[in-house]
Amino acid sequence: MASSSTSADKPITVLVADDHPLMREGIATVINAEQDMVVVAEAADGIEAVRLQEQVTPDVVLMDVQMPEMDGIAACIAIRARKADARIIMLSTFRGDVQVLRSVQAGAIGYLLKSKIRFDLPTAIRTVYQGRKYIPVEVAMELAAHVTDETLSAREVDVLRRVAEGHSNRRVAAQLHVTEQTVKSHMKNLMTKLSARDRTHAVMIAIRRGIIEP
Protein backbone atom coordinates (compact mmCIF):
# COMPACT_ATOMS: atom_id res chain seq x y z
CA MET A 1 0.00 0.00 0.00
CA ALA A 2 1.13 3.55 -0.64
CA SER A 3 2.67 5.51 2.19
CA SER A 4 0.95 8.62 3.43
CA SER A 5 4.17 10.57 2.86
CA THR A 6 3.94 10.15 -0.92
CA SER A 7 1.26 9.74 -3.51
CA ALA A 8 0.73 7.87 -6.74
CA ASP A 9 1.13 11.22 -8.52
CA LYS A 10 4.62 11.75 -7.09
CA PRO A 11 6.15 8.37 -6.31
CA ILE A 12 9.53 7.82 -4.67
CA THR A 13 12.06 7.50 -7.49
CA VAL A 14 14.65 4.74 -7.11
CA LEU A 15 17.97 3.93 -8.79
CA VAL A 16 18.94 0.25 -8.61
CA ALA A 17 22.64 -0.65 -8.86
CA ASP A 18 23.53 -4.35 -9.04
CA ASP A 19 25.76 -6.26 -11.46
CA HIS A 20 23.33 -9.19 -11.77
CA PRO A 21 20.50 -8.56 -14.30
CA LEU A 22 18.15 -11.05 -12.62
CA MET A 23 18.65 -9.38 -9.25
CA ARG A 24 17.91 -5.96 -10.76
CA GLU A 25 14.81 -7.40 -12.39
CA GLY A 26 13.63 -8.91 -9.12
CA ILE A 27 14.20 -5.68 -7.22
CA ALA A 28 12.37 -3.68 -9.89
CA THR A 29 9.42 -6.08 -9.71
CA VAL A 30 9.12 -5.59 -5.94
CA ILE A 31 9.40 -1.80 -6.21
CA ASN A 32 7.09 -1.31 -9.17
CA ALA A 33 4.39 -3.37 -7.45
CA GLU A 34 4.12 -0.55 -4.88
CA GLN A 35 1.92 2.44 -5.73
CA ASP A 36 4.19 5.01 -4.10
CA MET A 37 7.56 4.14 -5.67
CA VAL A 38 9.08 3.46 -9.08
CA VAL A 39 12.46 2.41 -10.55
CA VAL A 40 13.75 5.22 -12.78
CA ALA A 41 17.22 3.86 -13.64
CA GLU A 42 19.39 0.75 -13.36
CA ALA A 43 23.17 0.44 -13.15
CA ALA A 44 25.37 -2.63 -13.59
CA ASP A 45 28.42 -1.29 -11.74
CA GLY A 46 29.52 1.47 -9.40
CA ILE A 47 30.79 3.80 -12.11
CA GLU A 48 27.46 3.67 -13.91
CA ALA A 49 25.62 4.17 -10.61
CA VAL A 50 27.53 7.38 -9.88
CA ARG A 51 26.86 8.69 -13.39
CA LEU A 52 23.16 7.84 -13.35
CA GLN A 53 22.64 9.26 -9.88
CA GLU A 54 23.92 12.60 -11.10
CA GLN A 55 21.81 12.48 -14.27
CA VAL A 56 18.55 11.18 -12.78
CA THR A 57 18.86 12.42 -9.16
CA PRO A 58 16.62 9.70 -7.70
CA ASP A 59 15.10 10.00 -4.24
CA VAL A 60 16.71 6.74 -3.10
CA VAL A 61 19.66 4.69 -4.39
CA LEU A 62 19.83 0.92 -3.86
CA MET A 63 23.49 -0.05 -4.05
CA ASP A 64 24.93 -3.56 -4.15
CA VAL A 65 28.07 -3.75 -2.00
CA GLN A 66 29.99 -6.02 -4.36
CA MET A 67 30.16 -4.85 -7.99
CA PRO A 68 32.84 -4.76 -10.72
CA GLU A 69 34.73 -1.66 -11.90
CA MET A 70 33.79 0.27 -8.73
CA ASP A 71 32.26 -1.46 -5.71
CA GLY A 72 29.23 -0.16 -3.85
CA ILE A 73 31.22 1.34 -0.98
CA ALA A 74 33.39 3.44 -3.33
CA ALA A 75 30.33 4.44 -5.36
CA CYS A 76 28.51 5.50 -2.19
CA ILE A 77 31.45 7.70 -1.19
CA ALA A 78 31.58 9.24 -4.68
CA ILE A 79 27.85 9.99 -4.71
CA ARG A 80 27.87 11.49 -1.23
CA ALA A 81 30.84 13.68 -2.18
CA ARG A 82 28.70 15.22 -4.93
CA LYS A 83 25.38 15.13 -3.10
CA ALA A 84 25.76 15.12 0.66
CA ASP A 85 22.08 14.40 1.32
CA ALA A 86 21.84 11.42 -1.06
CA ARG A 87 19.79 8.61 0.49
CA ILE A 88 21.55 5.31 -0.14
CA ILE A 89 20.63 1.79 0.95
CA MET A 90 23.38 -0.80 0.67
CA LEU A 91 22.36 -4.30 -0.41
CA SER A 92 24.38 -7.35 0.56
CA THR A 93 24.23 -11.11 0.85
CA PHE A 94 26.18 -10.92 4.11
CA ARG A 95 25.26 -9.43 7.49
CA GLY A 96 28.92 -9.11 8.55
CA ASP A 97 29.63 -6.23 10.90
CA VAL A 98 32.67 -4.95 8.98
CA GLN A 99 30.67 -4.57 5.77
CA VAL A 100 27.89 -2.76 7.63
CA LEU A 101 30.34 -0.43 9.34
CA ARG A 102 32.08 0.38 6.04
CA SER A 103 28.71 1.15 4.48
CA VAL A 104 27.72 3.52 7.27
CA GLN A 105 31.11 5.22 7.20
CA ALA A 106 30.72 5.67 3.43
CA GLY A 107 27.48 7.58 4.02
CA ALA A 108 24.76 4.98 3.53
CA ILE A 109 21.75 5.39 5.82
CA GLY A 110 20.25 2.00 5.07
CA TYR A 111 21.47 -1.60 4.91
CA LEU A 112 19.39 -4.53 3.70
CA LEU A 113 20.16 -8.22 3.25
CA LYS A 114 19.25 -9.49 -0.20
CA SER A 115 17.40 -12.40 1.39
CA LYS A 116 14.97 -9.84 2.88
CA ILE A 117 14.30 -7.83 -0.28
CA ARG A 118 10.97 -9.44 -1.11
CA PHE A 119 9.42 -8.55 2.24
CA ASP A 120 11.38 -5.60 3.66
CA LEU A 121 12.51 -3.52 0.68
CA PRO A 122 9.44 -1.22 0.40
CA THR A 123 9.64 -0.41 4.12
CA ALA A 124 13.37 0.24 3.87
CA ILE A 125 12.88 2.61 0.94
CA ARG A 126 10.10 4.56 2.66
CA THR A 127 12.11 4.81 5.88
CA VAL A 128 15.24 6.12 4.15
CA TYR A 129 13.19 8.45 1.94
CA GLN A 130 11.88 10.07 5.11
CA GLY A 131 15.47 10.70 6.20
CA ARG A 132 15.62 7.96 8.83
CA LYS A 133 18.18 5.16 9.09
CA TYR A 134 17.19 1.59 8.26
CA ILE A 135 19.30 -1.24 9.70
CA PRO A 136 17.54 -4.57 10.43
CA VAL A 137 17.69 -5.87 13.98
CA GLU A 138 19.78 -8.93 13.09
CA VAL A 139 22.33 -6.74 11.31
CA ALA A 140 22.46 -4.26 14.17
CA MET A 141 23.01 -7.12 16.63
CA GLU A 142 25.92 -8.42 14.55
CA LEU A 143 27.42 -4.94 14.52
CA ALA A 144 27.00 -4.54 18.28
CA ALA A 145 28.54 -7.94 18.97
CA HIS A 146 31.88 -6.82 17.53
CA VAL A 147 31.90 -3.15 18.48
CA THR A 148 34.84 -3.64 20.88
CA ASP A 149 36.82 -6.02 18.65
CA GLU A 150 40.29 -4.98 17.57
CA THR A 151 40.46 -4.04 13.88
CA LEU A 152 42.74 -5.90 11.50
CA SER A 153 45.41 -3.79 9.84
CA ALA A 154 45.47 -3.37 6.06
CA ARG A 155 48.49 -5.68 5.84
CA GLU A 156 46.82 -8.33 7.99
CA VAL A 157 43.75 -8.24 5.73
CA ASP A 158 46.00 -8.55 2.69
CA VAL A 159 47.79 -11.56 4.17
CA LEU A 160 44.53 -13.24 5.14
CA ARG A 161 43.06 -12.63 1.69
CA ARG A 162 46.04 -14.38 0.09
CA VAL A 163 45.81 -17.25 2.56
CA ALA A 164 42.12 -17.58 1.67
CA GLU A 165 43.18 -18.01 -1.96
CA GLY A 166 45.12 -21.09 -0.89
CA HIS A 167 48.66 -19.71 -0.71
CA SER A 168 51.17 -20.97 1.87
CA ASN A 169 53.00 -18.63 4.22
CA ARG A 170 56.09 -18.97 2.07
CA ARG A 171 54.18 -18.06 -1.08
CA VAL A 172 52.49 -15.08 0.59
CA ALA A 173 55.90 -13.89 1.82
CA ALA A 174 57.28 -14.03 -1.73
CA GLN A 175 54.27 -12.13 -3.09
CA LEU A 176 54.62 -9.38 -0.48
CA HIS A 177 58.43 -9.32 -0.57
CA VAL A 178 58.74 -9.97 3.15
CA THR A 179 60.13 -12.85 5.20
CA GLU A 180 58.10 -15.96 5.97
CA GLN A 181 58.50 -15.16 9.66
CA THR A 182 56.81 -11.78 9.07
CA VAL A 183 53.83 -13.50 7.48
CA LYS A 184 53.65 -15.95 10.38
CA SER A 185 53.65 -13.00 12.77
CA HIS A 186 50.79 -11.36 10.88
CA MET A 187 48.83 -14.61 10.93
CA LYS A 188 49.37 -15.01 14.68
CA ASN A 189 48.20 -11.45 15.35
CA LEU A 190 45.12 -11.61 13.14
CA MET A 191 44.05 -14.99 14.52
CA THR A 192 44.24 -13.52 18.02
CA LYS A 193 42.13 -10.54 16.95
CA LEU A 194 39.56 -12.82 15.32
CA SER A 195 39.64 -15.41 18.14
CA ALA A 196 40.33 -18.02 15.45
CA ARG A 197 41.52 -21.55 16.16
CA ASP A 198 43.54 -21.89 12.97
CA ARG A 199 44.02 -20.50 9.46
CA THR A 200 40.86 -22.04 8.06
CA HIS A 201 38.79 -20.77 10.96
CA ALA A 202 40.27 -17.29 10.51
CA VAL A 203 39.27 -17.26 6.85
CA MET A 204 35.74 -18.43 7.68
CA ILE A 205 35.31 -15.71 10.32
CA ALA A 206 36.70 -13.04 7.99
CA ILE A 207 34.29 -14.00 5.22
CA ARG A 208 31.31 -14.11 7.57
CA ARG A 209 32.12 -10.70 9.01
CA GLY A 210 32.78 -9.14 5.61
CA ILE A 211 36.49 -8.51 6.20
CA ILE A 212 37.33 -10.34 2.98
CA GLU A 213 35.14 -11.41 0.07
CA PRO A 214 34.42 -15.10 -0.54
Image (cartoon, rainbow, N blue to C red):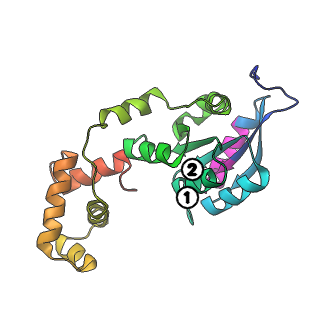
Q: Which residues are magenta?
A: 16-30
User: What crowding class fits label 2: few (fewer than 14 Cα within 10 Å), some (14-19), or many (20 or more)?
Assistant: many
Residue highlighted by disc 1: 67
The secondary element bearing badge 1 is classed as loop
Residue 67 visible at all: yes
Examine the structure image and report whether residue 19 is included in the region drawn in magenta. Answer: yes
In the rendered structure, the answer to whether residue 159 lies left or right of residue 141 reads left
In the rendered structure, the answer to whether residue 185 lies left or right of residue 15 reads left
Q: Quadrant of the C terminus?
A: bottom left
- Residue 102 image point, x, y percent: 44, 48
Q: From this viewpoint, which residue is outermost toward the right?
A: 9
Amino acid marked by disc 1: Met
Which residue lies at the image location 26% right of the left edge and 65% below the top edge? 159
Q: Nearer the viewer, residue 104 or 69?
A: 104
Amino acid marked by disc 2: Asp
- Residue 14 image point, x, y percent: 72, 42
Residue highlighted by disc 2: 64
Cα distance in 3D space between marks 2 and 1: 7 Å
- Asked if labels 1 and 2 touch by Cβ distance under 8 angstroms, the answer is yes
Which residue lies at the image location 73% right of the left edge and 55% below the top edge? 54
Which residue lies at the image location 30% right of the left edge and 67% below the top edge? 162
